[in-house]
Amino acid sequence: MSEPDSDKVDLRSEIPRFRPAAPPPSFGEFVENMRRLQDLAVCVDATDEVYQQARDRAAELVELLAPYAAREGKGPANRSMDLPGRGSLLMPPFHVEKFDEESVVARGVLRRYHLGGGGVAHGGVLPLIFDDNFGNVVYAAKRPISRTAYLHVNYRKVTPLDVPLIIEGKVDRVEGRKTFITARLTEEDGTLLADGEGLMVQLLPGQP
Ligand SMILES: CCCCC/C=C\C/C=C\C/C=C\C/C=C\CCCC(=O)SCCNC(=O)CCNC(=O)[C@H](O)C(C)(C)COP(=O)(O)OP(=O)(O)OC[C@H]1O[C@@H](n2cnc3c(N)ncnc32)[C@H](O)[C@@H]1OP(=O)(O)O
């Protein structure tokens, strides 16, 4: 990639400047295969012979990729805006559909590797979805770079897997350095699954 390898930070903070990536063509399929692998890793019931082969092939993949490990903000993961979850395996595979000062809306599915129990999503995944939405809302609203001070999620219904989900978040109010954000996670028909509220606090110069 011809991007400058710069340590420059966003002028508003010490956080590395956020630069969207144009990933190489195969990167998206690589990430989707990795997600599929995660689905399988949490659900297969195989023989030791199969696990031995899987172990060895996983080790080969590690060997292939390890030389290319790069610092934050350099590789395409987490910065590929056209890929689900920005191409980050940490992020649930959601696509941002609306990103402006009024609100940020993202749509996606949780899948087998997000299973908690009883066939539905692990509750711990939801704060990740809300936190990411809050970060986007702050950015879309052109508020200064901020970090989450608190995040509260109300679980209204169990969250299904493999069903399209929508999260919409917006700025509720601003008080000095503090941006209060509210968001709702729904199914496509509007069924409310969870709502959340968070406080994002503007970082001061030098705060990590
Ligand atoms: C992260 C950058 C995001 C950039 C987005 C970029 C691009 C967008 C495009 C793509 C999207 C990419 C990414 C977006 C995704 C994710 C973003 C997620 C963000 C995070 O996931 S980030 C990690 C979790 N986060 C932390 O790791 C924070 C650790 N922590 C601290 O860094 C400090 O704690 C800090 C800085 C929060 C405050 O510290 P501080 O010393 O500067 O300020 P202080 O304590 O004085 O608080 C000032 C006023 O907030 C009130 N206040 C504070 N805390 C409160 C609480 N809990 N409850 C109620 N009120 C509270 C005080 O009462 C006072 O209020 P008042 O002024 O009225 O007295």
Image (cartoon, rainbow, N blue to C red):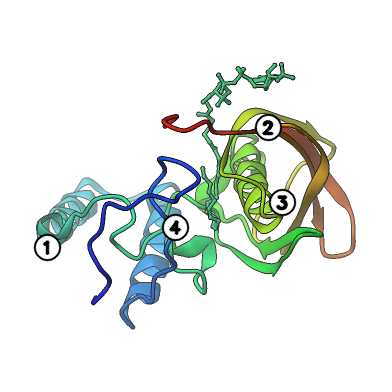
Q: Which amino acid does label 2 sit on?
A: Arg
Q: Percent x, y for residue 118? A: 67, 39
Which label lies toward us, 1 or 2? 2
Please tell me whether mark 1 sits on a helix, a strand or a loop: helix
Residue under pointer 4? 18
Earlier in the chain: of badge 1 and badge 3, it is 1
The residue sitting at 73% across, 46% down in the picture is 159
> Mark 3 packing: few (<14 Cα in 10 Å), some, or many (20+)?
many
Q: Mark 2 points at which residue?
A: 177
Three-letter code for the amino acid on which mark 1 is drawn: Leu
What distance separates the C-alpha of mark 2 from that of mark 3?
36 Å
Quarter holding the N terminus is bottom left
Residue 109 x/y as whole percent: 64, 60
Q: Is mark 4 within 8 Å of ligand 1?
A: yes
Disc on the earlier residue, 1 or 4: 4
Q: Name the residue under label 3.
A: 160
Compute the Cα span from label 1 to label 2.
45 Å
Label 4 or label 3, whichever comes before in sequence order: 4
For the residue labelled by badge 3, is the local secondary structure a helix, a strand or a loop? loop
Instruction: Give the quarter of the image for residue 73.
Output: bottom left
